[in-house]
Image (cartoon, rainbow, N blue to C red):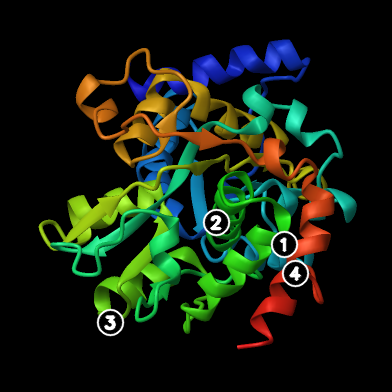
């Protein structure tokens, strides 16, 4: 299916939502996203711009901003004029909703709770796996240097933390064991970059660390593109299903006159071509119809738990673990 069908498919969504499909007067759209989506949206935007021009006769330029998801959310709160956000973790969009920038029921706007693709958390080690890292327990051994982004600023950092905590809570004896494990893990992580791509640079370009905890898509990018033959992926025995969400920034699109194009843009992520582009950039698609088997072959079955199973509420988890004075601050201040 050609990407030129993207707009037509998304226009059908407008009818369902009761929104006019009239073209807006603006010629730019700003997508504020998190670190590892650079390659995904570079490919998606090019196709979307072409399809919009084909369908409407008008040019549209999709602009991108990338960084740690938490920092990106704060930038939007501080006035960065995002039309849409494609962030790494639901609590970052919840923060925008609390500030009145995004509707409070934003998870209901798009399918699958406004999550168009998923990922998971894996490890990247150097060729030959010299430290013999096989599972989460190996990351707290003496002499193992762990690279991971800060959970204070990075959604990847928070997913890594949550994956580690969940593994320990479910397999090592409960919440007290989880806290003890996570404290030991971060004692082995001397450098916390502000975003996931920064941690990739630290591990790959600067050659620091024995193991990188990473989004699966970032791990696949490293092993297949950035350092083919130099690195290996290790998949832990249990990990978390990472679900990066999307939303229209309602306050901004109403000011910019870009609501229709913003909904069209995000709706296109759910089309067969949008899902194919996600898979090509190592995100697990929701729908596999139309995605070549070769693209799906890079996604082995993994044993996952969901965020809700272990943690329940995003709001409560954000406050307990990642807000100032929370569990992460308490354990990291001791190092």
Residue shown at the point (71%, 37%) measured from the top left: 308
- List the residue tagged with mark 3: 206
Element assignment for label 2:
helix
Front residue of this view, candidates 177 and 207: 177
Give the alpha-carbon distance from disc 1 to disc 2, as whole Å.
29 Å
Q: Which residue is mark 2?
A: 164
For label 4, the crowd category at 10 Å Cα-Cα, with few meaning under 14, some 14 to 19 and many 20 or more, is some
Residue occupying the point 58% across, 39% down? 243
Q: CA distance from mark 4 to mark 3?
A: 30 Å
Picture disc at residue 76: 1
Q: Are marks 2 and 3 in contact (CB under 8 Å)?
A: no
The residue nearer to you, when weighing 274 against 154, is 154
45 over 279 or under it: above or below: below
Tell me which corner region of the image, top left, top right, bottom left or bottom right, holds residue 53: top left
2 or 3: mark nearer the eye: 2
Which image quarter is the C terminus in?
bottom right
Image quarter in which the N terminus is found: top left
Dot 3 or dot 1: first in sequence order is 1
Residue 220 in the image: state x and y as whole percent: 28, 48
Compare marks 4 and 3 and give the one earlier in the sequence.
Answer: 3
Q: Residue at x 68, y 18 (%)?
A: 14
In the image, 328 versus 13, the foreground residue is 328
Q: Residue 327 — which label?
A: 4
Q: Nearer the viewer, residue 180 or 225?
A: 180
């Amino acid at each position: 299916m050609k990407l030129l069908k993207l707009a037509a498919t998304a226009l059908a969504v407008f009818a369902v939502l009761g929104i006019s499909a009239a073209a807006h007067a603006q010629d730019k759209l700003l997508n504020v996203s998190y670190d590892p989506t650079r390659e995904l949206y570079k490919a998606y935007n090019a196709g979307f711009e072409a399809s919009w021009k084909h369908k409407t006769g008008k040019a549209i330029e999709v602009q991108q901003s990338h960084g740690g998801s938490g920092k990106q959310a704060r930038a939007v709160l501080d006035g960065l004029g995002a039309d849409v956000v494609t962030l790494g973790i639901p609590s970052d969009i919840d923060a925008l909703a609390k500030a009145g920038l995004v509707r409070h029921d934003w998870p209901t706007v798009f399918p699958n709770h406004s999550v168009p693709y998923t990922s998971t958390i894996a490890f990247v080690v150097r060729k030959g796996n010299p430290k013999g890292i096989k599972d989460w327990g190996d990351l707290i051994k003496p002499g193992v240097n762990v690279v991971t982004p800060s959970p204070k600023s990075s959604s990847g950092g928070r997913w890594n933390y949550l994956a580690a905590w969940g593994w320990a809570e479910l397999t090592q004896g409960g919440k007290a064991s989880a806290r003890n494990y996570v404290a030991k893990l971060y004692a082995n992580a001397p450098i916390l970059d502000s975003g996931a791509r920064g941690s990739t640079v630290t591990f790959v370009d600067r050659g620091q660390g024995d193991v990188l905890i990473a989004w699966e898509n970032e791990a696949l990018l490293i092993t297949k593109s950035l350092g083919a033959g130099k690195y290996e992926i290790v998949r832990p025995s249990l990990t978390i299903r990472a679900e990066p969400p999307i939303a229209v920034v309602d306050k901004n699109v109403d000011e910019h006159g870009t609501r229709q194009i913003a909904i069209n843009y995000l709706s296109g992520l759910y089309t067969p071509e949008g899902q194919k582009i996600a898979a090509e950039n190592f995100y697990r698609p929701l729908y596999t119809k139309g995605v070549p088997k070769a693209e799906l072959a890079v996604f082995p079955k993994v044993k996952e738990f969901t965020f809700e199973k272990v943690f329940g509420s995003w709001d409560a988890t954000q406050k307990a673990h990642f807000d100032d004075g929370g569990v992460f601050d308490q354990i990291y201040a001791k190092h």
